[in-house]
Image: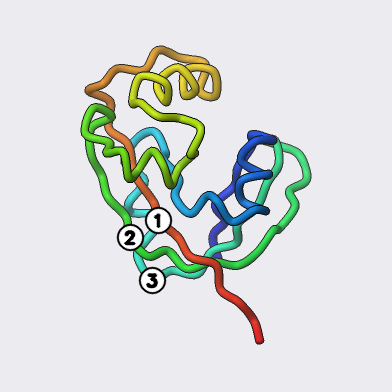
């Protein structure tokens, strides 16, 4: 089983409030995160313990240029980020490198699996 891990404390809050059901990852990782795969949604820093929040299914995986991200993608990624430029600034902090609007990203939509 794979995990979709989130490092930002803000993302943890959005995930716990179920306001985030999409992640944008730098590069083409579509061969790792396949549609209909079951994943753990986790939070934690690299090389440290992770906390599992819930199990999810990957609904949709899209590969596109950074500049092709839609308002729908942005809203489901983080409702506080309204433009592609704002997301680029955020990514530059996370990845600690310059982001070009020509860079390839993978957009992963997911839904929580509720055990009953």
Image quadrant containing the C terminus: bottom right
Q: Is residue 59 above or below residue 105?
A: below
| Disc 2 from disc 1: Cα separation | 5 Å
Residue 39 screen position, x and y as percent: 54, 64
Mark 3 is surrounded, within 10 Å at the Cα level, by few (under 14), some (14 to 19) or many (20 or more) other residues, namely: few
The disc at residue 18 is none
Q: Which residue is mark 2?
A: 60
Residue 25 screen position, x and y as percent: 42, 39
Mark 1 is surrounded, within 10 Å at the Cα level, by few (under 14), some (14 to 19) or many (20 or more) other residues, namely: many
Q: Which residue is mark 1?
A: 109
> Could you say which is closer to the camera, residue 81 or residue 25?
81
Secondary structure under tag 1 reads strand
Residue 2 screen position, x and y as percent: 54, 60
Q: Is residue 48 left or right of residue 15?
A: right
Mark 2 is surrounded, within 10 Å at the Cα level, by few (under 14), some (14 to 19) or many (20 or more) other residues, namely: some
Select label 1 or label 3 by which is in front. 1
Q: Is residue 82 above or below residue 13?
A: above
Q: State the scheme by which the image is colored.
A: rainbow
Q: Residue at x 47, y 68 (%)?
A: 57
Q: Residue at x 55, y 24 (%)?
A: 94
The disc at residue 36 is 3
Secondary structure under tag 2 reads strand
Q: Residue at x 23, y 32 (%)?
A: 65
């Amino acid at each position: 089983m794979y995990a979709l891990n989130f490092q930002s404390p803000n993302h943890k809050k959005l995930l716990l409030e179920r306001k985030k059901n999409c992640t944008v990852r730098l590069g083409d990782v579509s061969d790792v995160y396949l549609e209909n795969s079951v994943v753990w949604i986790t939070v934690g820093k690299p090389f440290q313990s992770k906390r599992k929040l819930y199990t999810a299914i990957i609904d949709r995986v899209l590969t596109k240029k950074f500049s092709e991200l839609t308002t729908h993608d942005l809203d489901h990624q983080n409702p506080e980020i309204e433009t592609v430029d704002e997301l680029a600034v955020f990514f530059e902090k996370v990845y600690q490198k310059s982001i070009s609007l020509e860079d390839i990203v993978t957009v992963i939509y997911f839904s929580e699996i509720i055990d009953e």
